[in-house]
């Protein structure tokens, strides 16, 4: 057994059931060892896409994400996806071949690359310690919720490795929360008359506990964008807090006298640069990471601990809190963006993105998993397309890069093969990641790819256009994305009006043996409602 064999097989034994990547000479043998160990290898067309697929797979499945890349250029190609994963604290191992001679044309400082984007760098340094290094990398990824770049030097890969068992990484057991902090939070919740709970990624495993607690104290429920769907179906759910929030959610969150962030950073996205939290409201935060408490805004009370454990430990008396029959009726009538009346501004040759999104929400099966790219358009699929639960939505937006959406949907689709995968893209991000359409077709994924096509970088058009700036750098000729989709092997539609969506019904009623690409020519008259709020942070 070589070092490459030992590393690949150890990683497979430690939970790498899916491995995403692009194979070159440097990661050829270790990737084959992963496959031999039982992992499924998913070949992407670009390392950046592979990185995002691994990230999305980990987020949606709750398992370890694994990426395999070539030395030097393979890693640099993947860096945007790795940066997104690192900023999102995705448990992921990046298996990167490495040259150690500065004279090699493949040489880059891979450790510096990793740390510069917030990832953790590890390196296999000897044959005898190779497996122990893999175990350490997996432990750091899963226990510390970190993205780990595991460098595997070429000059070590072919060395003989000792044959032995792999020490399993035990499940992470978070420390118990401080009882005095839990008591203080219980007192604050008991005192509140209008409490709101905002749950983030760190609360996705604790729906039942948070709903029970909210029921006792009368709290309303909301989520950050990345936890969208966590409280789906709950009559007291306000949906997404922050820039995507609908008018009723804005009113009720702003009116809270206590806001509790559960595994949620309470960052500028989630609080609309702080404006969603009233000046007189108390703010509490629960997080596993002590450094996260108050990192984005001051909090009155911070509790270090696992969200599920803290919520289960709280003892609060029964109270109506924010809840009333009248409010329940209001939430049922207008608690979603699609319930808010709007004037359809569709034109002869372009469809209003609100009309498009509402109709797609009606047409597509409820059991869906949605991956969303970045851009002016992204609020529409995020807020108008409902999802069945927190595993039905994947939002790779910590780095705010466009071009990740299609790969996001691929990773999420492989994590949830029981659901219809939907990729929601802008034309800018769609074209940036379009090579992965071949991956969708090759894998046989019955995916719906919706491109909100405004022939430009809409965020910049609507941000800079009103000030009179030239927009020549961010506007482009219309692209026939439907034709491009057919070239890759997709079924494709060009949608300019609601009636054009009849093709979606035909595809859904058919065998779904090819992906469906919808080239939706959307109106360009106005910015999406959340855009100017978001640009306040620039």
Image (cartoon, rainbow, N blue to C red):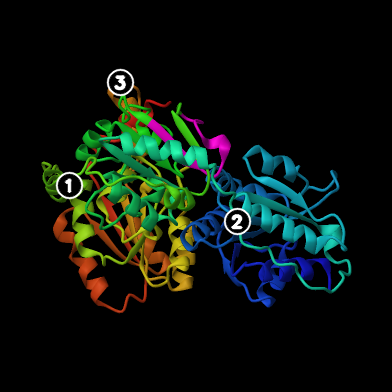
Q: Residue at x 62, y 67 (%)?
A: 16
- Please state which of the two labelled residues, at mark 3 or mark 1, is closer to the viewer: 1
Q: Are marks 1 and 2 in contact (CB under 8 Å)?
A: no
Circle 3 SS class: loop
Q: Earlier in the sequence, mark 3 or mark 1?
A: 1
* Direction from residue 478 to residue 50 in the image, left or right: right
Q: Nearer the viewer, residue 238 or 28?
A: 238
Q: Residue at x 49, y 38 (%)?
A: 181
Q: Which residue is tagged 2?
A: 173
Residue 282 at x, y percent in the picture = 36, 29
Label 3 and label 1: CA atoms lie apart by 40 Å
Residue 383 at x, y percent in the picture = 28, 48
Label 2 and label 3: CA atoms lie apart by 56 Å
Q: Which mark is residue 331?
A: 1
* Quadrant (top left/top right/bottom left/bottom right) for the N terminus: bottom right
Q: Residue at x 75, y 67 (%)?
A: 167
Circle 1 SS class: helix
Q: Is residue 295 magenta?
A: yes
Q: Which residue is tagged 3?
A: 468
Circle 2 SS class: loop
Pointer 1 local density, CA inside 10 Å: few below 14, some 14–19, many at least 20: some
Residue 242 shows in this picture: no
Considering every residue shown, the one lying at the far top of the view is 467
Pointer 2 local density, CA inside 10 Å: few below 14, some 14–19, many at least 20: few
Pointer 3 local density, CA inside 10 Å: few below 14, some 14–19, many at least 20: few
* Direction from residue 190 to residue 321 in the image, left or right: left
Give, as a single range, the part of the protein colored magenta: 283-296
Q: Nearer the viewer, residue 53 or 47?
A: 53
Residue 53 at x, y percent in the picture = 52, 58
Residue 424 at x, y percent in the picture = 35, 53
Q: Earlier in the sequence, mark 2 or mark 3?
A: 2
């Amino acid at each position: 057994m070589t070092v490459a064999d030992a590393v690949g097989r150890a990683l497979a034994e430690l939970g790498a059931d899916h491995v995403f990547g692009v194979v070159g000479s440097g990661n050829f043998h270790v990737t084959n060892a992963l496959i031999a160990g039982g992992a499924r290898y998913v070949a992407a067309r670009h390392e950046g896409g592979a990185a995002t697929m691994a990230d999305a797979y980990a987020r949606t499945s709750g398992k370890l994400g694994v990426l395999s890349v070539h030395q030097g250029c393979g890693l640099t190609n993947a860096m945007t996806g790795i940066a997104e994963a690192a900023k999102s604290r995705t448990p992921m191992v990046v298996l990167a071949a490495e040259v150690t001679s500065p004279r090699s044309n493949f040489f880059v400082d891979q450790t510096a690359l990793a740390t510069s984007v917030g990832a953790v760098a590890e390196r296999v340094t000897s044959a005898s310690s190779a497996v122990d290094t893999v175990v350490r990398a997996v432990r750091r990824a899963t226990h510390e919720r970190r993205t780990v770049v595991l460098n595997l030097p070429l000059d070590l890969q072919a060395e003989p490795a000792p044959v032995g068992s792999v020490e399993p990484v035990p499940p992470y057991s978070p420390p118990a929360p401080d009882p005095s902090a839990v008591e203080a939070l219980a007192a604050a919740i008991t005192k509140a008359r209008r409490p709101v709970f905002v749950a983030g990624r760190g609360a996705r495993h604790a729906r039942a506990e948070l709903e029970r607690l909210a029921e006792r104290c009368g709290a309303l429920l909301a989520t950050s964008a990345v936890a969208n769907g966590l409280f789906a179906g709950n009559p007291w759910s306000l949906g997404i807090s922050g820039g995507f929030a609908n008018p009723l959610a804005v009113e009720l969150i702003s009116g809270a006298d206590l806001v509790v962030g559960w595994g949620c950073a309470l960052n500028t996205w989630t609080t609309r640069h702080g404006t969603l939290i009233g000046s007189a409201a108390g703010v509490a935060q629960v997080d596993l990471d002590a450094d996260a408490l108050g990192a984005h805004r001051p909090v009155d009370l911070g509790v270090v601990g696992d969200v599920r454990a803290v919520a289960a430990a709280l003892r609060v008396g029964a109270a109506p809190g924010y809840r009333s029959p009248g409010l329940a009726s209001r939430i049922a009538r207008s608690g979603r963006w699609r319930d808010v009346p709007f004037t359809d501004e569709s034109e002869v040759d372009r469809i209003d993105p609100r009309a498009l999104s509402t109709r797609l929400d009606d047409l597509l099966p409820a059991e869906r998993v949605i991956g969303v790219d970045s851009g002016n358009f992204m609020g529409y699929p995020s807020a108008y397309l409902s999802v069945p639960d927190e595993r039905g939505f994947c939002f790779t937006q910590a780095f705010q890069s466009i071009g990740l959406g299609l790969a996001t949907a691929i990773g999420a689709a492989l994590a949830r093969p029981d659901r219809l995968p939907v990729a929601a893209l802008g034309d800018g991000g769609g074209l940036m990641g379009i090579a992965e359409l071949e991956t969708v077709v090759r894998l046989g994924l019955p995916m719906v790819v919706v491109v909100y096509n405004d022939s430009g970088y809409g965020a910049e058009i609507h941000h800079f256009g009103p000030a009179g700036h030239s927009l020549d750098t961010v506007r482009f000729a219309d692209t026939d994305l439907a034709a491009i989709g057919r070239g890759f092997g997709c079924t494709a539609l060009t949608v300019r009006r609601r009636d054009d969506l009849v093709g979606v019904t035909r595809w859904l009623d058919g065998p779904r043996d090819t992906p469906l690409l919808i080239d939706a020519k959307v109106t360009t008259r106005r910015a999406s409602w959340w855009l100017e709020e978001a640009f306040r942070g620039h």
